[in-house]
Image: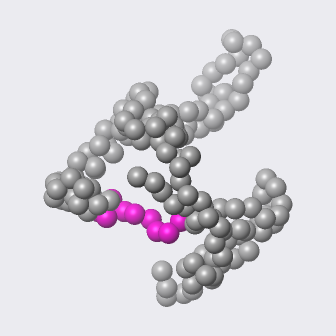
């Protein structure tokens, strides 16, 4: 199973941009919600989508609980979910404390070796935004939402 990703160019002039000028961003077609994902799984597995949705909700709950209790969760060929911490260091070991050094936690996802290999086979192409979706975009490539739409 090969993938195909389209990219668009943006002229990113934000003050926070790592590099001024044109860069590429992947075109995200839509966001797939859990119900739609369950319907896709139903087509692939012949298990009705209501049961798939229930199992997906249970899996998400268990992953959340396990990760928040210090475990990493390996998701087969997809990858591993875990926690990392954001914070600062200290010069000496006796100066290290959770209160002073940990500024926040993040859920992280690390793709598996198999997924990384599959990424190398994805077909990539450049598209012009107006030609690919018919919506208006700002200078940073964000979709402009007109009142009453979307």
- Can residue 76 be seen at all in this image of the molecule? yes
**Colouring mode (rainbow / by chain / secondary structure / one colour):** one colour
The relative height of residue 124 versus residue 114 in the rendered view (above or below) is below
Residue lying at 57% horizontally and 78% vertically, measured from the top left: 132
How many marks the image carries: the answer is: 0
- Residue 28, image x, y percentages: 53, 65
Q: Which residue is found at the position 49% from the left and 34% from the top?
A: 113
Position of 57 with respect to 94 (left or right) is: left
- Residue 139 at x, y percent in the picture: 74, 74
Q: Residue at x 22, y 58 (%)?
A: 42
Residue 47 falls in which quadrant of the image?
Answer: bottom left
Depth check, front residue: 4 or 146: 4
Asked whether residue 145 is in view, the answer is no
Q: Nearer the viewer, residue 146 or 130?
A: 130
Say whether residue 49 is left or right of residue 1: left
The percent position of residue 30, horizontal first and vertical second, equals 46, 68
Q: Look at the magenta stretch and give its main secondary structure.
A: loop
* On screen, residue 22 above or below 74: below
Q: Image quarter for residue 86?
A: top right
Residue at 52% from the left image edge and 40% from the top image edge? 117
Magenta run includes residue 38:
no
Quarter of the figure with residue 142: bottom right
Q: Find residue 55 and report its horizontal and vertical position in percent.
A: 23, 48
The magenta segment: 28-36
Residue situated in front as seen by the camera: 140 or 65: 140
Vertical placement of residue 65 versus 60, above or below = above
Q: Is residue 81 left or right of residue 136?
A: left
């Amino acid at each position: 199973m090969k993938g195909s990703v389209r990219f668009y160019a943006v002229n990113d002039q934000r003050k926070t941009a790592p590099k001024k000028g044109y860069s590429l961003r992947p075109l995200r077609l839509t966001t797939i919600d859990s119900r739609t994902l369950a319907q896709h799984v139903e087509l692939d597995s012949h298990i009705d989508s209501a049961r798939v949705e229930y199992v997906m909700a249970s899996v998400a709950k268990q992953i959340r609980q396990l990760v928040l209790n210090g475990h990493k969760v390996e998701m087969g060929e997809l990858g591993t979910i875990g926690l990392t911490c954001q914070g600062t260091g200290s010069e000496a070991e006796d100066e290290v404390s959770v209160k002073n050094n940990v500024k926040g936690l993040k859920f992280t996802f690390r793709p598996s070796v198999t997924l990384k290999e599959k990424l190398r086979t994805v077909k990539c192409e450049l598209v012009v935004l107006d030609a690919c979706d018919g919506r208006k975009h700002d200078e940073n490539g964000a979709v402009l939402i007109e009142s009453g739409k979307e």
